[in-house]
Image: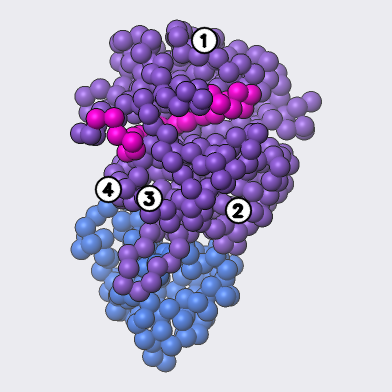
Chain colours: A blue, B purple
Amino acid sequence: MKINIPTPLRSYTRHASVVDAEGASVGQVLADLERRNPGFRFRIIDEQDGIREHIKIFVNEDQVPNLDMPLRPGDTMHIICALSGGLEPHLSLTTTEAQPKFLQVTESRTILSWRRE
Amino acid sequence: MAKLSVLVGTRKGAFILSSDKSRKSWKVSEAMFLGHIVHHIVLDPRDQRTLLVAARTGHLGPTVFRSTNFGKTWKEAERPPAFAKVEEGQKGLVLNHVFWLTPGHASQPDVWYAGSSPQGLFRSEDGGRTWDGVRGFNEHPMRESWTGGLGDGTPDGPKMHSINIDPRDPNHMYLGMSSGGVFESRDGGKDWKPLNKGCAADFIPTPDPEYGHDPHCVMLHPLMPDRLYQQNHCGIYRMERSEGTWIRIGNSMPKKVGDIGFPVVLHPRDPNTVWVFPMDGSTVWPRTSPDGKPSAFVSRNAGKTWKRLDSGLPKRAWFTVKRQAMANDTFDPVGLYFGTTSGEVWASRNEGEKWNNLVSHLPHIYSVETAVTAK
């Protein structure tokens, strides 16, 4: 499947904005991504298999709740650096505010990488 | 001729300031890891060429980068520090950032220690390539009680810092935690005991608690390893380990200045000389210099008396000097360096008698360390 990679992670993908990986679930695809791009996974997935606070993952237009989410042939995964990423933890936005409107992304294929300083 | 480097970690990357023993002219490197939050950049004094950097970004999780050629090229740790994964249904610790790096004992050339937020201790035995949690701390049955949980810490997260190794014994270690206090291990980290007797913790309702204190910076003197100095949330302290009690040496600071601050710096050859950089810990804790008048203070008699050292510093300024943002070199006279939250590095070639600005307009400075190398 195709995975859209945001700019902060492209140092792991040899600057590729779109990469390929295989797997029947989000977790399996991320494991394959890690095999192909060592170090990638821990920057976005924590040691308890949680998606990091300021990272959002979408499959097509659906936000991924956890790594068990199954995948279908033809799905596209988007890894997004969320709006809240530049904040110190104690200033984090609420969950609702932090989630970008993903429909803005799909048309332009522009990966959101907003930072609020 | 010996080369002197000042290693600066900032909110937006790392920088290296370079000079020589004269300390008269300086070069500032390009930004390294631009955009990364660099909490600490430290040289391995055992090989004088390996640098480790503790980094994360606003979005991306924590990691450690490693250079074996003094910053020319970098590689990321193959297995960065991380807490142990817990079983399904349990809530496990998640590393937010690596806050502190300490090279191991001289007899253990590839060993490093890292302290994290939330409070965790990690050890590498291969020069920083791979890291494992120190189970004797991270899985200690008292860890949660000692640390007070995730809500009890500094505004950007509770931290482990000030990892000190006894130069006589690699198994004898001290560490500091905000929150938690000072802890000691005599068995290489297998077990830990609080070491806070005599230290105030006036923000806790319990009188004289065994733990829960807030050390900001703890330093062991390398030539007198049974002497510890501590800049605490509640004052400046010294401990003679055989006595086992912290003595508040900050009581002799000028009352208008007080004895609150973040860093404490020790003279490399004189265990009686110690520098601090006071900040305003009154009212809502501005953490800027008292009355906006920045100054270091030195004691030459282990804390009995203190002298103000502000020649060359701005008459008024409103920056903060963070806990790992002040350091010394090993030349004679000793050079001192501190970085500010407003992105300035200040230096003194004469033990604080006169200060000069080395560089301005860097990002918010988190850490300052020095490295004296052969060339």
Residue B258 seen in this snapshot = yes
Residue A25 lies in the magenta stretch: no
Q: Earlier in the sequence, mark 3 or mark 2?
A: 2
Q: Residue at x 64, y 38 (%)?
A: B169
Question: At which x and y percent is residue B43?
Answer: 64, 40
Query: Farthest front residue?
Result: B242
Tell me the tag on residue B143.
Answer: 3
The residue indicated by pointer 2 is: B124
Among the 4 quarters of the image, the one containing residue B85: bottom left
Total label count? 4
Tell me the tag on residue B301.
Answer: 1
Which of pointers 3 and 2 indicates the residue nearer the eye? Answer: 3
Which of pointers 4 and 3 indicates the residue nearer the eye? Answer: 3
Image height of B93 relative to B32, above or below: below
> How much space separates mark 1 and mark 2, taking CA atoms?
37 Å
Among the 4 quarters of the image, the one containing residue B348: top right
Image height of A68 relative to B190, above or below: below
Which of pointers 1 and 3 indicates the residue nearer the eye? Answer: 3
The local secondary structure at tag 1 comes to loop
The local secondary structure at tag 4 comes to loop
Quadrant for the C terminus of chain B in the image: top right
Determine crowd level at label 4: few under 14, some 14-19, many 20+ residues with C-alpha closer than 10 A.
Answer: few
